[in-house]
Amino acid sequence: MPCYLGIDTSNYTTSASVYDSESGRMLMGKKLLPVKNGECGLRQSDAVFHHTQQLSEVIKKLFAEADGCGISAVGVSSRPRDAEGSYMPCFTVGLNAASIISSVNKLPLYAFSHQSGHIAAALYSSGKTELLNERFLAFHVSGGTTEAVISQPDDERIISVSLAAKTLDLNAGQLIDRVGVMLGLPFPCGMELERLAAANTEKLRGIRPTLKGADCCLSGVENICRKAYENGASKEYTASLCLGYVEAVIEKMCKAVLEEKGEMPVVFAGGVMSDRIIRDQLASQFDAYFAEPAYSADNASGIAYLCSIMHNKEICC
């Protein structure tokens, strides 16, 4: 059966996926990078070390599950975004491993951006892959990126995007982790912060997101949450305040971009979009498509899916 291997070594997750293009089945393997309690992240040198330690383990377990699946091509995320100068050392771990697998097994190798992988994972898991042939707006909201991009059909790269809006300071995932660590939660803090917020019974007060054009600023939200907590707000209220601001900011950005660029389908991708509170509110405002939670967090499934498309295009042409 024609299967495709995808590898992604982002800043906080070592991941690999195998996609069976005949059955549509996707197998996923991943492992978080270890972060010490009380810290909000890792240095790139530490991320590279941990990916190097973990990638063989992730791939070994994945192939035990994918026994009998013949790999036709290898895909890998080689950079954060499709933009000039986009680079992070941690992606070299996955690229080197993919290059070795490709060379030894004489398989085609296709490189994509981490952002393209997130968008493709959202389209695959929401059953809307036909949007790859259309113009659509995609939000990539995570610890490393908070952007709105417009995707156009592109035979050469499958997903070709232009920037429509961005954060001017903190990323949404960074804000969530900083507030979570302040509240004593383990990093990454998204799931536990959502749990706290879901238990909040107080009405949120004074959420007024500020944009510059369609771009957002989130560093002030961290200060607002810290001040509220220091002035006696509960952990539950503070968590809900943080997520409420993130949702309000994304909602306002989306409306600003659609007003400027015209109506088009909207796709929400990235780890922050696994938060049900944010997702449910955005779904009530837009006729949009969301990555399933397992496909929202960092994963290599979108890379494996893009690899299959690219390989089949080359075979056909």
Image (cartoon, grey):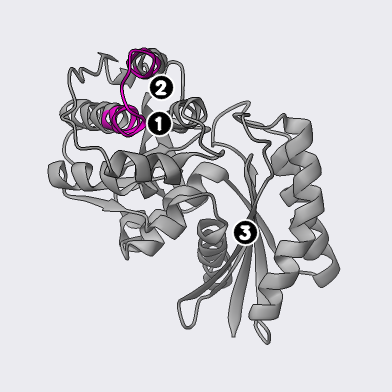
When the figure is inspected, residue 275 is found, relative to residue 262, above or below; the finding is: below
Image quarter of the N terminus: bottom right
Mark 1 residue type: Glu
Looking at the image, residue 238 sits to the left or right of residue 146; the answer is: left
Q: Image point 79% across, 32% down: which residue?
A: 45
Q: Earlier in the sequence, mark 1 or mark 3?
A: 3
Q: Main secondary structure of the magenta part?
A: helix
Q: Earlier in the sequence, mark 1 or mark 2?
A: 1
Specify the farthest residue to the right.
104
Residue 129 screen position, x and y as percent = 35, 62
Looking at the image, residue 30 sits to the left or right of residue 292; the answer is: right
Which quadrant holds residue 303? bottom right
Measured in 3D between alpha carbons, the distance from the residue under mark 2 to the one under mark 3, in whole angstroms, is: 28 Å
- Check disc 1 and report the residue beneath it: 147
Q: Give the range drawn in magenta.
A: 225-244
- Observer-nearest of 236 and 280: 236
- Check disc 3 and report the residue beneath it: 30
Measured in 3D between alpha carbons, the distance from the residue under mark 1 to the one under mark 2, in whole angstroms, is: 7 Å
